[in-house]
Amino acid sequence: MEFILENEILHVTVQSYGAELVSVVNKQTGQEMLWQADPAVWARHAPILFPYCGRLKDGCFTHKGVRYEGGQHGFARDMEHTLRERTADSVTLCLEANALTMKKFPFAFQLITTYTLEGNAVSHRVEIINDSDEVMPFGFGFHPGFNCPFEEGKATQDYVLRFDAPQSPVVVETGEQDGLVTGERRPLFQNETDIPLTDTLFAHDSICMTKLTAKTLSVVEKATGRSVDVEIAGFPYVLIWSAPGPLHFVCIEPWHSLPDTRNASGQWSEKPAAAQLNPGQRFATALKMRFNR
């Protein structure tokens, strides 16, 4: 099922499958600003990542002696979410633990997603509730993809990723083949604001950055200043990514977690870089995307 949110600036579509944002259109220009999931390039728009981000070592984890298999980025993006509330400028959806999720993740939970229009911005708030009777470790991340170049006739080199303040990011290295954290870290640059976009920037895969102090990371058209601004303050990790080859889109991904390390034990209770919720406890996070186009 699809839900339309609309104001004088934006026409936004959210689908219940995956609770995924699937369209953000500028009403004045008619331009679609969100990646449209071309299956020949990348068949998603803006998936949510739960109960973990990235890959599991050996594609599984163990909890209380039971093995649970799982693919990349968890299962929330591939399940139907039910409607909780609908207003003129917002929609709230929920995924609750059920027989299917228990085969993949042995905890009772609620994953509540709310999209709200705020002028030229889309706010995406997520609340996670531990309904089980034990501590629930988990990871969560956002993964929106933005059309880039913004329009035909523009080239990849016409754009940069820009922090709102000079940064000295540290890159958390992952293996090119296995996607697991290697334990190595390196500086990306020192006291700079811009990451130039090229068609080879993501040849290795995503770039996972930490030690950031910026409030926003934006996709910026250099000649015009048009941009998509993503608020990243409060997130321990921010990834940037696109599919290999000529650039069609770029993802800015604020995460609260990391993939497994290469030396991970596989025990869910020992998973690093994951939140820990006590029974009945709630976790909330939010992402705001401002479309200055």
Image (cartoon, rainbow, N blue to C red):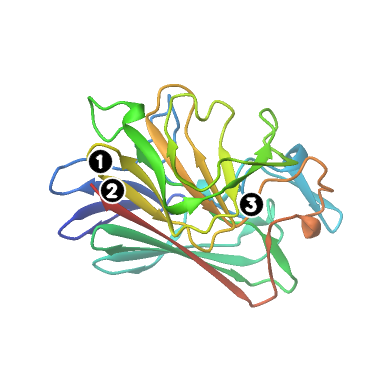
Please state the horizontal and vertical placement of residue 7, each as a whole percent of the image.
19, 60
Q: Residue furthest bottom?
A: 280
At label 3, counting other C-alpha atoms closer than 10 Å, the crowd grade (few under 14, some 14-19, many 20 or more) is many
Query: Picture quarter containing residue 179?
Result: top right
**Which residue is located at x 15 percent, y 59 percent?**
8
Mark closer to the chain start, 1 or 2: 2
| Discs 3, 2 touching: Cβ within 8 Å | no
Q: Tell me the amino acid under the disc marked 3.
A: Tyr
Q: Which numbered circle lies on residue 24? A: 2
At label 1, counting other C-alpha atoms closer than 10 Å, the crowd grade (few under 14, some 14-19, many 20 or more) is some
Q: Residue furthest front?
A: 191
**Callout 2 secondary element:** strand
Mark closer to the chain start, 3 or 2: 2
For residue 72, side relative to residue 2 (left or right):
right
The residue beneath circle 3 is 52
For residue 9, side relative to residue 181 (left or right):
left
**Callout 1 secondary element:** loop
Mark 1 vs mark 3, CA separation in Å = 29 Å
Q: Residue furthest right?
A: 65
Mark closer to the chain start, 1 or 3: 1
The residue beneath circle 1 is 32
Q: Tell me the amino acid under the disc marked 1.
A: Glu
At label 2, counting other C-alpha atoms closer than 10 Å, the crowd grade (few under 14, some 14-19, many 20 or more) is many
Residue closest to the eye, 21 or 163: 163
Q: Is residue 79 visible?
A: no
